[in-house]
């Protein structure tokens, strides 16, 4: 099949969270399975490995004609096009200190139109454009207008007659809601307004949900949850489209492999965890914490957003500080939680590190060094860090929601099963209770701990498994 993945983020070129990781990894897995994959993402800055194709397209939006360029890169067999336009050349991806950029609808509508144009216009490494018999795979609200433009602009003009469309839902918390008055700017016929309208506003995510032929939620549990309370108001529409909606867990990219991770001072595997102890000592030294091999190290890495349940960590902190533990936290986002990080470290300088900022290398070193990973998310569509943790022998303690419920199985000492702790009620009591079990098992039952680590490390979170499921969705979306 020929797949065109359109997304606002594409790791390693651009990333604020899991969306970037997934969009970077899935195409590689699809190419390995024999498909041709083109990704289309913005050129937020000058990428060293992407070259100007010299091809340009003109797109009418918001009453003006906009000229876009395309930069190309072939990597791991995946064709990448980066859409070049001045509105993408900014310090932040979605916004800056004063909030989201006011023209995000324009920016991502432009990306979506540019992706459709690129498919038949821009020659790829074999000298020809990808063509029109493709499946468009849009991701989240930013690119949820791809199915709209496909149906409203291109098919009526006789283009993409056999093309399919899929929309992945990585996070229902962002709809890209806009005033209805913006509709005219999109340059589509008035009959498309009802597909976009939601409570008197334009809802971009809703548009994609209504018009994409198939929908994917990033875990089976999330696929159910978003029809029954976690759909941020779109639950009804999603359950009406139940037959076209499937849940597919994300996989773990090869960059997260403790046997050869470039960010680590030592490597390790399920058979030999010696290198993990080296990583722990190195991180303690790096962060200026006492180098103590036996002390349990608890970690947290997250965007500091309401979704992530940092409030439970804050509530648990006094209890944690009564235990003999080290706590290492890395994140950036909401100022109140950044302040919590700094304050916790200030109060407990020999036991807590709260690193504010985005640091890819440190995230890898923390995953490798820690013993326990805390992920008490309010909701979590899929979640990657709990899977990274398991791969790195770091036992996760998670709230049983979305992909966390699908990937972390609570330890059963009697059965000798489980890979961590997944607590059911979203409360500090339940979180502390689960942490208590984790700490007890760590300190008193080393063999049981080793079993937890090994089962997590041996779980198959490969992208190949997820890619084979996407393949079935793509195939079902193509009409002859
Ligand atoms: P989300 O997509 O909601 O942010 P995920 O768990 O799916 O959550 O993905 C988070 C990704 O972002 C992981 O790769 C994680 O390591 C990374 N990440 C989040 N915050 C930071 C940070 N401050 N520094 C480095 N990496 C981070």
Image (tube, rainbow, N blue to C red):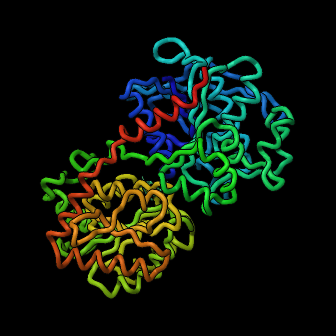
Tell me where residue 396 appears, x and y as whole percent.
34, 65
User: In this rendering, is residue 447 above or below 380?
Assistant: below
Tell me where residue 119 appears, x and y as whole percent.
60, 22
Q: Nearer the viewer, residue 72 or 418?
A: 418
Tell me where residue 170 appears, x and y as whole percent.
54, 50
Task: Tell which quarter ligand 1 is in.
Answer: bottom left
What residue is drawn where x is 57% and y is 53%? 171
Question: Does the image show residue 151?
Answer: yes
Tell me where residue 312 appears, x and y as whole percent.
47, 76
How many discs appear?
0
User: In this rendering, is residue 33 above or below 320?
Assistant: above
> Quarter-wise, where is residue 142 in the image?
top right
Q: Residue furthest top?
A: 127
Q: Nearer the viewer, residue 273 or 283?
A: 273
> Quarter-wise, where is residue 342 in the image?
bottom left
On-image quarter of the C terminus: top right
What residue is drawn where x is 44% and y is 41%? 12
> Quarter-wise, where is residue 84 in the image?
top right
Question: Does the image show residue 340?
Answer: no
What residue is drawn where x is 86% and y is 47%? 181
């Amino acid at each position: 099949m020929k797949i065109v993945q359109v997304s606002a983020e594409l790791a390693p070129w651009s990333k604020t969270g899991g969306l970037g990781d997934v969009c970077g990894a899935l195409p590689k897995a699809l190419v390995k399975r024999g498909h041709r994959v083109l990704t289309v993402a913005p050129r937020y800055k000058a990428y060293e490995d992407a070259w100007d194709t010299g091809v340009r397209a003109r797109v009418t939006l918001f009453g003006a004609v906009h000229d876009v360029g395309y930069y190309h890169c072939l990597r791991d067999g995946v064709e990448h096009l980066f859409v070049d336009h001045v509105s993408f050349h900014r310090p932040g991806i979605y916004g800056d200190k004063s909030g989201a950029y006011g023209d995000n609808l324009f920016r991502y509508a432009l990306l979506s139109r540019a992706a459709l144009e690129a498919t038949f216009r821009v020659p790829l490494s074999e000298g020809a454009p990808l063509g029109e018999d493709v499946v468009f795979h849009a991701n989240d609200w930013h690119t949820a207008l791809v199915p709209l433009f496909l149906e409203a602009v291109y098919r009526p003009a006789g283009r993409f007659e056999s093309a399919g469309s899929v929309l992945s839902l990585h996070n229902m918390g962002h709809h890209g809601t806009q005033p209805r008055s913006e509709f005219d700017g999109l340059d589509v016929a008035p009959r498309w307004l009802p597909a976009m309208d939601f409570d008197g506003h334009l809802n971009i995510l809703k548009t994609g949900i209504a018009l994409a032929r198939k929908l994917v939620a990033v875990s089976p549990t999330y696929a159910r949850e978003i029809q029954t309370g976690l759909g941020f108001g779109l639950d009804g529409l999603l359950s009406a489209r139940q037959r076209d909606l499937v849940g597919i867990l994300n996989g773990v990219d090869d960059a997260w492999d403790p046997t050869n991770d470039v960010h680590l001072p030592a490597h390790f595997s399920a058979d030999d965890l010696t290198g993990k102890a080296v990583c722990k000592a190195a991180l303690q030294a790096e962060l200026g914490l006492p180098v103590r091999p036996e002390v349990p190290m608890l970690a947290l890495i997250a965007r500091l957003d309401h979704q992530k349940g940092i409030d439970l960590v804050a509530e648990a902190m006094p209890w944690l500080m009564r235990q003999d533990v080290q706590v290492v936290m890395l994140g950036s986002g909401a100022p109140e939680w950044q302040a919590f990080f700094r304050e916790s470290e200030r109060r407990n300088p020999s036991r807590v590190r709260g690193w504010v900022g985005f640091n890819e290398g440190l995230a890898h070193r923390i995953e490798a060094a820690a013993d326990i990973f805390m992920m008490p998310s309010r909701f979590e569509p899929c979640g990657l860090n709990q899977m990274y943790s398991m791969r790195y022998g770091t036992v996760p303690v998670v709230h049983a929601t979305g992909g966390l419920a699908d990937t972390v199985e609570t330890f059963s000492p009697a059965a000798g099963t489980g890979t961590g702790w997944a607590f059911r009620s979203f409360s500090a009591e339940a979180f502390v209770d689960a942490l208590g079990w984790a700490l007890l098992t760590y300190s008193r039952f080393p063999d049981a701990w080793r079993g937890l680590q090994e089962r997590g490390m041996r779980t198959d979170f490969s992208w190949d498994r997820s890619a084979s499921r996407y393949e079935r969705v793509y195939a079902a979306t193509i009409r002859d």
